[in-house]
């Protein structure tokens, strides 16, 4: 694998920075929405909860944003590998986005399958609701941390 010459890497640095900032910010939007509505949703009745959950149909397309955030933060880490502070911040951003995926696939997705994407309510629906809602709170925190780490990586790279 050929290593990008320093002058070409520097010319592309702004592209890496903008992409990482854009996609980590976009990844925060849906999880931030979940976080903001948490208090209103956590105590809804079963019928109200099913009604509200229908609003999320089509949100699976947001997976594209997450993949883009993963790739962009990884590219930023690669591009800043010669600057320890910026590199570590970019790796932290990448790790946070990976963390959101672990939460999704280990907690959120199994609940989605168990409830047929909230079209049916099993007997333990309240326990499942709590798992689903808290998984989104955790993801929002991780997405916010990824955005902050991306900002730090960009700031530290510019200062170097």
Image (spheres, helix red, strand yellow):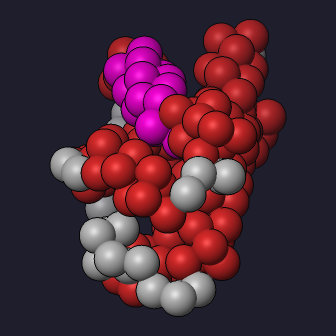
The reply to whether residue 65 is visible in this rendering is: yes
Report the number of numbered marks: 0
**Residue 53 falls left or right of residue 36:** left
Please say whether residue 19 is one of the residues in the magenta stretch: yes
Please state the horizontal and vertical placement of residue 139, each as a whole percent of the image.
62, 52
Which quarter shows the C terminus? top right
Q: Residue at x 54, y 78 (%)?
A: 125
Front-most of residues 3 and 127: 127
The reply to whether residue 76 is visible in this rendering is: no
Please state the horizontal and vertical placement of residue 74, each as a whole percent of the image.
48, 49
Q: Residue at x 53, y 88 (%)?
A: 123
Front-most of residues 75 and 140: 140
Please state the horizontal and vertical placement of residue 106, each as a whole percent of the image.
54, 80
In the picture shown, does residue 92 fall above or below 95? above
Q: Residue at x 40, y 46 (%)?
A: 52
Q: Which residues are magenta?
A: 13-31
Front-most of residues 30 and 23: 30
**Residue 55 falls left or right of residue 86:** left
In the picture shown, does residue 89 fall above or below 16? below
* Type of secondary structure dominating the magenta stretch: helix
Q: Quadrant of residue 159?
A: top right
Q: Quadrant of residue 9?
A: top left
Please state the horizontal and vertical placement of residue 130, each as a whole percent of the image.
66, 67
In the picture shown, does residue 7 fall above or below 78? above
Front-most of residues 5 and 43: 43
Which quarter shows the N terminus? bottom left
- The residue furthest top is 159
């Amino acid at each position: 694998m050929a290593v990008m010459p320093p002058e070409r890497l520097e010319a592309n640095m702004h592209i890496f920075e903008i992409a990482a900032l854009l996609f980590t910010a976009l990844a925060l939007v849906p999880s931030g929405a979940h976080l903001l509505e948490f208090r209103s949703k956590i105590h809804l009745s079963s019928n109200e909860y099913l009604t509200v959950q229908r609003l999320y149909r089509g949100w699976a397309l947001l997976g594209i944003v997450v993949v883009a955030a993963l790739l962009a933060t990884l590219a930023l880490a690669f591009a800043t590998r010669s600057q320890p502070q910026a590199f570590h911040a970019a790796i932290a951003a990448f790790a946070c986005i990976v963390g959101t995926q672990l939460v999704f696939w280990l907690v959120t997705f199994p609940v989605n399958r168990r409830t047929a994407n909230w079209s049916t309510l099993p007997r333990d629906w309240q326990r499942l609701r709590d798992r689903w809602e808290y998984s989104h709170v955790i993801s929002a925190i991780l997405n916010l941390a990824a955005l902050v780490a991306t900002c730090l990586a960009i700031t530290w790279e510019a200062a170097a």
